[in-house]
């Protein structure tokens, strides 16, 4: 019987970009296999098991292939030593745990490399779509739809999203994982993704690499660039959109904040 993707060896000779893709694909294959099996897991325990197994896979593979690098992961205690490191892998072993545990398709695996102040490589695996998008890919063609479409969290869309959508006449499209939503912008399925509240560096690092490679606008909601490998990894807001929409959307965000200065987004990816 041929080996599954997550059972195949990963070479340390791969470039950082190819390694990020191989790691994300391998972890995604492991998770899809787990999700597809008949098990006695409850939805909650299935999500927890997926988080654990994917983290262990990525941790083991990084120790084998890049033993000197540091790792910042959602599923492991933060190590202060990463702040002094030149290379830090920022990973989310399972982004969209709820969607995964419910058997949905819109979850992802994020693997990114921060190097000397910048994100230099990254990949987002969408296992249920058999896709891995990387920092070496371009954007897709725009989908044939009428009007603007904004991807937002399915379970906890930020309050500001409704105000911005009404301002720019956009339709809200609920989706799961932050990586899934960013890839939907990159592929042309939707036009923008707006999030406010509840994210950390691992939620957006790999998606940002993919978005930038696709030529998309990426910023915080105030228009500034997101920064990574910070002492506090909390990075709560993100805007990803087609570049020609950035001025329109940022202006709408500004108006929404002026109208409701106390508005805060809800947690979620």
Image: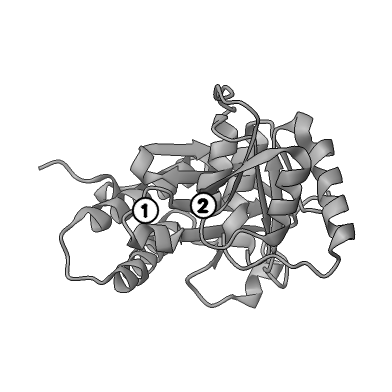
C-beta proximity under 8 Å, tags 1 and 2: yes
Residue ID at (69%, 53%): 161
Observer able to see residue 48: yes
Helix, strand or loop status at disc 2: strand
Residues at marks 1 and 2, CA–CA distance in whole angstroms:
10 Å
Tell me: 251 left or right of 166. right
Vertical order, 21 against 63 (above or below): above
Which quarter of the picture shows residue 196? Answer: bottom right
Mark 2 neighbour density, 10 Å: few (under 14) some (14–19) many (20 or more): many
**To which residue does mark 2 refer?**
111
Residue ID at (86%, 44%): 251
Mark 1 neighbour density, 10 Å: few (under 14) some (14–19) many (20 or more): many
Residue at the limit of the structure toward the left, as seen here: 1
Q: Position of residue 217 (x, y in %)?
A: 74, 38
Quarter occupied by the N terminus: top left
Q: Position of residue 124 (x, y in %)?
A: 49, 45
**To which residue does mark 1 refer?**
27
Observer able to see residue 136: no
- Nearer to the camera, 241 or 110: 241
Which quarter of the picture shows residue 48? Answer: bottom left
Q: How many marks?
A: 2
Q: Position of residue 107 (x, y in %)?
A: 43, 52
Helix, strand or loop status at disc 1: helix
Residue ID at (77%, 29%): 244
- Nearer to the camera, 148 or 234: 148
Circle nearer the N terminus (1, 2): 1
Tell me: 169 left or right of 185. right
Vertical order, 198 against 187 (above or below): below
């Amino acid at each position: 019987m041929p080996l599954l993707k997550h059972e195949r060896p990963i070479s340390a000779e791969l470039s950082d970009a190819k390694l990020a893709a191989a790691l994300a694909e391998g972890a995604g294959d492991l998770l899809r296999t787990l999700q597809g099996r008949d098990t006695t897991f409850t939805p909650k325990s299935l999500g927890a098991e997926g988080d654990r197994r994917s983290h262990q896979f990525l941790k083991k593979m990084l120790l084998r292939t890049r033993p000197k690098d540091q790792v910042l992961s959602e599923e492991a205690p933060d190590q202060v030593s990463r702040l002094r490191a030149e290379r830090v892998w920022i990973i989310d072993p399972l982004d969209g745990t709820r969607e995964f545990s419910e058997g949905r398709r819109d979850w992802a695996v994020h693997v990114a490399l921060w190097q000397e102040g910048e994100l230099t490589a990254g990949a987002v695996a969408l296992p249920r779509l058999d896709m891995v998008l990387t920092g070496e890919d371009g954007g897709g063609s725009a989908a044939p739809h009428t009007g603007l479409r904004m991807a937002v969290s399915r379970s906890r869309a930020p309050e500001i999203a409704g105000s911005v959508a009404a301002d720019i006449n956009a339709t809200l499209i609920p989706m799961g994982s932050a990586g899934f939503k960013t890839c939907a912008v990159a592929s042309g399925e939707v036009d923008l993704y707006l999030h406010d509240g509840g994210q950390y560096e691992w939620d957006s690092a790999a998606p940002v690499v993919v978005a930038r490679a696709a030529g998309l606008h990426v910023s915080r909601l105030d228009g500034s660039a997101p920064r990574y490998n910070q002492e506090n990894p909390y990075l709560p807001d993100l805007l990803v959109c087609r570049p020609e929409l950035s001025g329109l959307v940022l202006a709408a965000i500004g108006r929404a904040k002026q109208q409701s200065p106390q508005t805060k987004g809800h947690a979620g990816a």
